[in-house]
Image (spheres, rainbow, N blue to C red):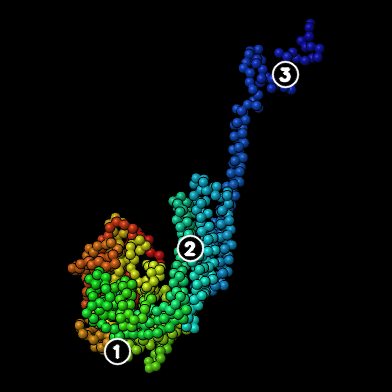
Amino acid sequence: MPSRHDDRGERPTRDGISPDSDDSFERLLTTSQTPLGKKRKKRRPVLKSPWFWVPVSLLIVLIVVGVVGALTAKRLYDQAMVAKNDLEQAIPLVDQVQQSMLAGDTAGAKTTIAKISALTDDAAKKTSTDLWRNAEWAPVAGPNLKAVRITADSVNGLVHDALLPLTGLDLKALLPKDGGIDVANLKTLADDIDTANTRMELVQKNIKTIDRSALVPQVADGLAKLDDAIAKIEPVLTPVHNALTILPKALGADGPQHYLLIFQNNAESRGTGGNPAAIAMLTATNGKISLTQQANSTDFTNGRPDPVVALNPETEALYGNKIGRYIQDSTLSPDFSETAQIVRAWWAEAYGTPVDAVASIDPVALGYLLRAIGPVAMPAPFDETLTADNAVPVLLNGVYAKYPDPEVQDQFFADAAKSVFDALITTHADPKALLTALTQASNEGRLMYSPSDEAQAKLLAGTPVGGNMPADNAKTTDLGVYIDDLTASKLDYYMQMSIAASSTQCQKPDAPTFSSTVTLQNTLDPGAVPGLPVYVDPGLFFPKGHASTDVYLYGPVGSSLTGVTVDGQPVAASGLPHLGRTVAKVNVLMAPGQTTTIAASFSAPSGAYGPLEVRQTPMVKATPITIDAPGCTPAKK
């Protein structure tokens, strides 16, 4: 039989294809016939087909991208964690810098700044890479990465351009020494602080660009901490910047400057404080300050037929023309710039000396200053020692019993003022204590300054030391409560005032209402009335011990008066315009021991209203104030 195998023992093949050949698999894939002999379409090798390599390539790319993405994400995560930790450590240290600066410990402040700087430099570096910025385009994570970068850059900028310049500020350089202040040093400091202030404004602008609604809680919390840090730096930086901008020129760096300093007697209340019974002229020349002239209310032509200067018609309608006919009434308006204008006119008429600015202080503020400079001995014939504890009772009450002669009283006030002034410019006071005293006096409206220079006035606009109510409700919504004694006495030494203010501005922003309620108490003991010195209460117009008081209640800018009550009973009161506000005027007469409550309500149109605040006449006794504005964020202090 013929063999089924050839002589080589190989299996027969179809079409000459050997199943054992090396390329048989490839040929099988490419042959035009099926193993059964049927024709088939010629195919390209799978390994050469795009249908094989495209998905494989995509898979490889996805794997690579995934690996790179994971590595990139890990790197970003690590950078973010480092930046987060750096910032969380740095921001709380700002508090330490502030405390060191206020304590005059510049070395300690610099040490803390070095720690902060190392942390913020690292955080800024970690968040400023190209990788980080490119990732900011990613959804969800992107806005958070951008916020972290802006925060890190902002904090680092604050450290280098705001905090570092502040460490070069020695508060002692702002204080008088041996009768003067180093003006050249102030100019150098002013340049540094100006740089710091510019950086602060830039940081505030940058963080406003962040969309906080897109932030995760961890990032939002970090940004809130930056807000808190700025809130702590700004109250230190802004007043220092304003002061250093003003001080060189104000201290006579460009020529002599002349200032009127009025001493307001709170025992006889007026709008900005009290009867300006004593006035002094201060002259500053190249940093040296001297008291060059003193006067009292009797040195001026009071009771004149016409005001000493043209008055604002609204001011005259509300307070009468007596505000310009008697220097004792020149402080009736709560706008200290109006007081300054009137007092300048009185001084120009009497003495002709040019006045560059008018400042004001009261005995309560003098008491604050005495906490910093220590007891002050007055010269003979008085031989009194004024202290932080006795300044108010001596100057506002005791002097009238001890020295019945009005001329001797005037001399006492003049000597007291000069003694405190001399001590202030020659004593090496504790800078922190003095700054605290000046700040408290300013915040309470007991220390005010109104310059003739428009640039200075613009810097002080809206600040407590400027002594003006805000021109709008944007930053704060202010209600005003001011009083004027009509008894020609010093009975307000015994007057206690408290104020309650409320608003619906956050509950009903489309039609908000505002109210102010002032409670006055004549705390004079009825049994003490017969023994009152004549100058404390002469009993000329009212029974002795009875206090007649005009009360002025100012609504917010643009508001309308809707009602007034006295002790809960409605009274007729028309609202008069002043300073862009509506004012209710009410007179009350209080016997010794009597308490009276006056309330006024106002309506206002829809608009932007800042946090509710109250401004009031600074009294002898501290004035408790309560504010009720449901749903509102309290004003920052």
Query: Disc 1 marks which amino acid?
Result: Pro
- Could you tell me how far apart the alpha carbons at marks 3 and 2 are, in whole angstroms? 86 Å
**Left or right: 559, with 201 as reference point:** left
Give the SS element for disc 2: helix
Q: Quadrant for the N terminus, please.
A: top right
Query: Disc 2 marks which amino acid?
Result: Thr
Give the SS element for disc 1: helix
Query: Which residue is tagged 2?
Result: 198
Which marked residue is nearer to the observer: mark 1 or mark 3? 1
- Could you tell me how far apart the alpha carbons at marks 1 and 3 are, in whole angstroms? 136 Å
Query: Disc 3 marks which amino acid?
Result: Pro
Q: Observer-nearest residue: 215 or 328? A: 328
- Could you tell me how far apart the alpha carbons at marks 1 and 2 are, in whole angstroms? 53 Å
Does the residue at mark 1 contact the one at mark 3 (Cβ under 8 Å)?
Answer: no
Which marked residue is nearer to the observer: mark 3 or mark 2? 2
Circle on res. 19:
3
